[in-house]
Amino acid sequence: MAQGLPPQRDHLGGARRGVPDLVPDHGHRAGGLHQDGAVRDHDAGAGLRGATAPHARGRRPDLPEGVVRVNFDWDVLVQAAKKAMGSAYAPYSKFPVGAAARVADGRFVTGCNVENAAYGVALCAECGLISQLVLSGGGRLTHFVCVNGSGDVLMPCGRCRQLLWEHGGAELEVLTSSGVRRMDEVLPDAFGADDLA
């Protein structure tokens, strides 16, 4: 457990690692209602304003005090995304996409794109991933990747970057074709819950 951080419980009542919640865990009451108010009521940036400052030479910002970066096996996540891609429904574009992410409590969530004859209502792989995240108990995403039908790493589209920001915040690490980047690099000056206040 990181020093100075109170013990926390995950959605199943188990002990969590000593990483502070950037957005409080949100569970659901009967009927799928959030038990602690709408997601926009969460103060997503609480305690982090001014805590991360980019290095003057453009290096990645430091993590807030008390948050530690863990060694992460990206190959496992890429394999999960490839497996999800195998379930994609893409009869129109012939462009299957799979996405996978790690949640702060250690779970993996995945999604695939689902197209529709009415092209505008197609769902990106990230949409399915976020639905699985919320359905399986919520939490914060810590690592994310998406791949195409050849298994090559893709960048999420603009709409999906916004979805990832909502559920992972600035610290979410995204595997890109140019390496691992934080979400605040992938979506700089993002619109979020604080903008609705």
Image (tube, rainbow, N blue to C red):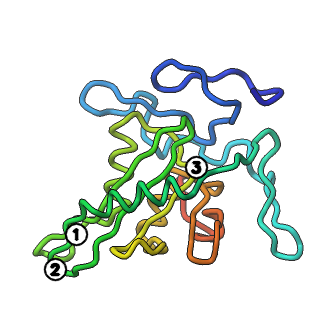
Residue 118, image x and y in percent? 12, 75
Residue at 38% over, 62% down: 82
Point out the tag, 1 or 3, that comes first from the N-terminus: 1
Point out the tag, 2 or 1, that comes first from the N-terminus: 2
91 up-or-down from 88: above or below: below
Q: Quadrant of residue 27?
A: top left
The crowd level at tag 3 (other Cα within 10 Å; few <14, some 14-19, many 20+) is many
**Front: mark 1 or 3:** 3
Marks 2 and 1 in Cβ contact (< 8 Å): yes
Mark seen at residue 170: none
Residue at 15% over, 75% down: 91
Find disc 3 in the rendering and name its residue: 142
Residue 54, image x and y in percent? 81, 66
Residue 117, image x and y in percent? 10, 75
Residue 76, image x and y in percent? 51, 53
39 up-or-down from 17: above or below: below
Query: Of the residues shown, which amino acid type is indicated by label 3?
Result: Thr
Q: Quadrant of residue 187?
A: bottom right
Q: Quadrant of residue 126?
A: bottom left
Marks 1 and 3 in Cβ contact (< 8 Å): no
Residues 170 and 156: in front is: 156
Residue at 48% over, 60% down: 78
Point out the tag, 3 or 2, that comes first from the N-terminus: 2
Residue at 60% over, 21% down: 15
109 up-or-down from 163: above or below: above
Mark seen at residue 92: 2
Judged from the image, the secondary structure of the residue bearing numbered disc 1 is loop
The crowd level at tag 2 (other Cα within 10 Å; few <14, some 14-19, many 20+) is few
Query: Of the residues shown, which amino acid type is indicated by label 2?
Result: Tyr
The Cα–Cα distance between marks 1 and 3, rounded to whole angstroms, is 26 Å
The Cα–Cα distance between marks 3 and 2, rounded to whole angstroms, is 32 Å
Find disc 1 in the rendering and name its residue: 122
